[in-house]
């Protein structure tokens, strides 16, 4: 675990829905407002915008009847609770990239642990099973084939991340091209791909070579692939590998 500070599903296409007003990025609940305030204090604008887009994609998916592959079926006890859990999962899914939560584990785990600590402090009434789903959604959001199947919350967040980065042609498959254009227009991307990559790499390179770095960027993980790509740029890398 990373050491952290205290801290109706009827099918409609996006085109058939009411356009998201700018003021509705945050669910109208006390918990989500607290989450928003906390995230806005600790995330750079590019990652904040990305996290909000992920929430809005996930929120859209939560109302859709057709999703790739069989969906896990356990849902939170109310639609309001689902929105809260989606929101904290989205807003904390990259929280591990900020210095406050830069622990020894990969950034996904640090963000997941931070979300659990936050919920325990601010929403102790949420059942442990739902808190665990939040942890899984954040911890596995970069894990293809795993994040989609652990639980419904994890599936929504994993697919939402894929949609925001337009991976595997998913925007076309799920019919969200209009939603994507809308969100990119109102929540500018601000070169999120480079910002997020640089934040993850910076944390990894700050760790000592050896076990500390391997824990921060395990081989075959997304952080591990970023590290490998960074090291391959360095002169003499191939010789060191041999």
Image (cartoon, helix red, strand yellow):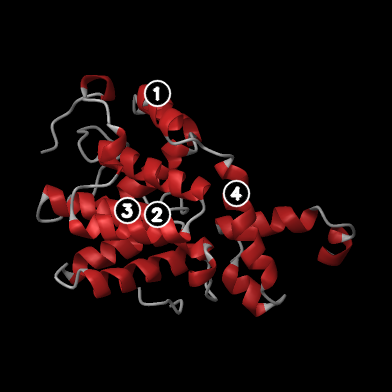
User: Looking at the image, is mark 4 or mark 3 earlier in the sequence?
Assistant: 3
| Residue wearing tag 3 | 154
- Toward which corner of the image does residue 177 lie, by quadrant? top left
Quadrant of image for the N terminus:
bottom left
Q: Residue at the spot x=41%, y=55% of the render? A: 40
Is label 3 in a helix, a strand or a loop? Answer: helix
* Disc 4 crowd, CA 10 A, few/some/many (<14, 14-19, 20+): some
Q: Are marks 4 and 1 in contact (CB under 8 Å)?
A: no
Q: Residue at the spot x=64%, y=54% of the render? A: 198
User: Looking at the image, is mark 2 or mark 1 earlier in the sequence?
Assistant: 2
Q: Is residue 116 left or right of residue 108?
A: left
* CA distance separating discs 2 and 1: 25 Å
* CA distance separating discs 4 and 1: 24 Å
User: Looking at the image, is mark 1 or mark 3 earlier in the sequence?
Assistant: 3
* Disc 1 crowd, CA 10 A, few/some/many (<14, 14-19, 20+): some
* Disc 3 crowd, CA 10 A, few/some/many (<14, 14-19, 20+): many
Q: x, y (%) of residue 107?
A: 51, 64
For this orientation, the residue located farthest to the top is 15
Decide: is 57 above or below 224. above
Quadrant of image for the C terminus:
bottom right
| Residue wearing tag 1 | 177
- Toward which corner of the image does residue 218 lie, by quadrant? bottom right
Q: Residue at the spot x=44%, y=28% of the render? A: 185
* Disc 2 crowd, CA 10 A, few/some/many (<14, 14-19, 20+): some
Q: Are marks 1 and 3 in contact (CB under 8 Å)?
A: no
User: Looking at the image, is mark 3 or mark 2 earlier in the sequence?
Assistant: 2
Decide: is 54 above or below 76. above
Q: Residue 146: which disc?
A: 2
Is label 4 in a helix, a strand or a loop? Answer: helix
């Amino acid at each position: 675990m990373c050491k952290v500070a205290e801290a109706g599903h009827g099918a409609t296409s996006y085109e058939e829905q009411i356009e998201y007003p700018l003021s509705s990025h945050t669910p109208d609940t006390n918990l989500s407002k607290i989450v928003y305030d906390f995230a806005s204090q600790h995330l750079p604008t590019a990652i904040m915008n990305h996290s909000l887009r992920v929430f809005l994609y996930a929120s859209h998916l939560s109302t859709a009847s057709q999703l790739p592959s069989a969906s896990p079926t356990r849902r939170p006890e109310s639609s309001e609770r689902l929105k809260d859990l989606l929101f904290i999962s989205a807003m904390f899914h990259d929280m591990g990239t900020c210095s406050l939560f830069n622990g020894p584990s990969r950034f996904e785990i640090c963000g997941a642990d931070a979300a659990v600590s936050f919920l325990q402090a601010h929403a102790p009434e949420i059942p442990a099973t739902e808190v665990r789903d939040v942890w899984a959604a954040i911890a596995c959001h970069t894990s293809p084939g795993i994040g989609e199947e652990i639980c419904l919350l994890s599936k929504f967040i994993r697919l939402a991340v894929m949609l925001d980065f337009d991976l595997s042609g998913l925007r076309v498959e799920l019919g969200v091209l209009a939603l994507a254009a809308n969100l990119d227009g109102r929540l500018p991307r601000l070169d999120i791909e480079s910002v997020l990559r640089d934040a993850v790499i910076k944390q990894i390179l700050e760790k000592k070579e050896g076990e500390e770095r391997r824990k921060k960027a395990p081989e075959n993980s997304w952080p591990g692939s970023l590290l490998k790509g960074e090291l391959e740029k360095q002169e003499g890398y191939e010789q060191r590998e041999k």
